[in-house]
Image: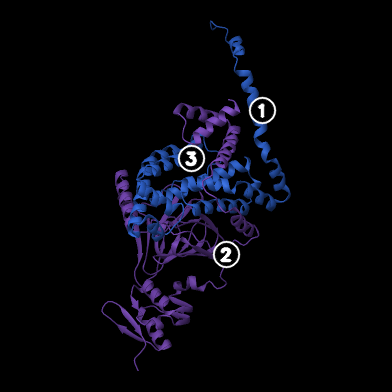
Amino acid sequence: MTAFPLNPLEEDFPGQQPENHDRVRSEAIVPDDEWLLRRQFAEAPDKACELLFRRYYVNLCNHTIRFVHSREVAEDIVSEIFTAFWQNQTFRHINTSYRAYLYKSVRHRAYNYLKWQVRFQHSADEPVHPSESPSPHEVLQYSELHQKIELIVRELPAQCRRAYLLKRVEGKKYDEIAQEMKISAKAVEALVSRALSRLRKELSAHWVLFIMLFFC
Amino acid sequence: MKESVIQLLLFDFFEGKTTSIQRKMIEEWLAEESNQELFYRYLDQWESEHPQFGPNKEIALEHFRSVMAGADETELHNIEPEPERPFRARRWFLAAAAVALVAAGLAFQKQILYKSLDAGPGKRITYRLSEGTEVLLNANSTLLVPRFGFLHNEREVFLDGEAEFKVTHTRNHDRFVVKMSDRYQIEVLGTEFVAFSRARGKRVFLKEGKVKLGLPEGRQIYMKPGNVFVSGQNGSYKMTVPTDTRPYTAWKEQTFYFNNTLLSDVAQQIGEQFGTQVRIPDTLLAQRRIGGIYKADQVDDLLQILSELMQIEVIQKEDHIELAIPKP
C-alpha cells in the first residue's frame, strides 16, 4: 500500500483534461484538408495527380533545393517522385496524407543524391526505400541536415561562396561566372571545387554520425 | 500541446533556431503518429512562406502530363553534367575518400575479400559461381567475386567489361547485384541479362526476368524483358525495346554484328574485344560505314574481312594497327 492516495491526485492534475481534448481535436483536423483530393483520386486519378502536382510542386522544389543546391536537380527529383507516384499507382496504397508521402519521398531522394555526391564509397546496406514511418528522430534529422549544409555554405569565404552559388544554384557556366566575378575561368573552377570539397569534408564528418543514428 | 505553440516551435526548428530541449520536446510530440501529419503540413506551410527560387511549374506540369499520357518508356533523360568534373576536384575527392577508407580500416577489403575472374583479349570464358549463377565473360573483361563465397543474403559482384549472366534463384530469394564503375549497378530479381561496362559507356540488355538498375545519382529504374538500357555521356541514358537484339549478344558466338556501323566504332570494338589498338588517321575513312555479321576468332580474321570488303590497307605499326586507303 502506498502512503499517498495516488488516484485522486491524478484526477486533480489540471493539465490532463484539456490536453486530451486538444489531441482529439487535432486528429480530426489533420486529414481534412485533403479529402477533396482523395475523392478526386477515386474518380479521376489523372486529374487528381495534376491537382496534386499544382498544389505541391513548387513547395517541394523549394524544400529539395535546400539539400541539393541546384535548381535543375531539385526540379528533376520532384518530377521523378511525381512520375513514380503516377506510374506505380502509389496513390492507391497511401495511408498517410499525400503531402506527408511526397515530403518524405523527396527528402529521401534528395538525401540519396547528396550521399552520392558527397560520399563515393558504396555501402551495400543502405535502405533503398524510404522507411514508411520514419522515427521522430529521423524526421528531425532531415531538417537538421539541410541546416547543416546551409551553415557550411554560409561559412565559406565570400568569393568561394559566390562562385559556388552561381555555379550550383544558378547553373551558370564557368566562363560566365568568370566574367561576372572578373577572374579567370580556372580560378572559378578552383573556387567551386574548393567549396565542394569543404562540403564533402564537413558533411562526411557529420555523416558518420548521421548514418550511425539513422540506420543502426 | 497547443497547435499555435507547436506551429511556432516547428517554424523555429525549420530555421534551426530551437534549443536542444525544445528539439526533445518536438521529438516527443512527433511520437504521436497523427502529429507527423501535422509536421509535414507545417513544413509545407513554412516552405510556402520561405520560397527559395521560382521553379517553372507550367513547363514541369506539361512534362508530367505527357508522362501520365504514357510517353515515358523511351524517353531520354538528360541529367546535368556534374559540376565537379574538373579532374583536380575528382582527385581530391578520391584522396579524401581513400583517407576515410584507411581510417575505417577498409582499405584492403576489396583485394582480400574478392578474387578476380578474367577473360583475356580475344577470349570468352564461362564461370560458374559458388551459388550456381553462370557468367559468360567476354574478352578483356574482369569480374570480381567474393573470395570466400557469398555472405548472408547478398550476392554482389563487380564487372569491368562485358558479360552475360544467368542468375540462379536461391531459396532465400537473395539479391544478386552487379556493380559497375561510375556507380551504375544492376539488381537482379532472378534472370538472364547482358551487361556492358566499359569506359565509353554502360549497356544492359535484359533477356528474361526482371532487374532493377541503380543509376549514379541514386535514381532507380526497372527493366522489362527485351529492354535495352544505354548510358550516354554526362549521365544521360536511353531505354529502348529493339526488334533486333543480335547486336547485344553477337559476341557470344565470336561474331561481330555491324549495322551501318562507323568504321571508327568498329576500330573501338576491335580494341575492346582483342586489346589491339586500331587507328584510322584518315577521318573520311573513319566515317565510312559497314554492315553485316562477321565471325572472327582472332583480330587478323576481322581485319582481313575489313580490308577485302572495304578495299582498305591494314598496316601493322609498332604498337598498333593502322587502317588507311591504299595509295594508287
The label on residue B281 is none
Label 3: chain letter: A
- Describe the colour scheme in one phrase: by chain
Q: Which residue is mark 3?
A: A142
Which of labels 2 and 1 is toward the front? 1
Q: Is residue B181 left or right of residue B168?
A: left
Q: Residue furthest bottom?
A: B328
Residue B52 vs B234, above or below: the answer is above
Residue B288 vs A10, above or below: the answer is below
Label 1: chain letter: A
Given the image, on which type of amino acid does mark 1 rest?
A: Arg
Given the image, on which type of amino acid does mark 3 rest?
A: Tyr
Q: Nearer the viewer, residue A2 or B112?
A: A2
Q: Nearer the viewer, residue B204 or A164?
A: A164
- In x, y percent, where is residue A114? 44, 48
- In x, y percent, where is residue B198? 40, 65
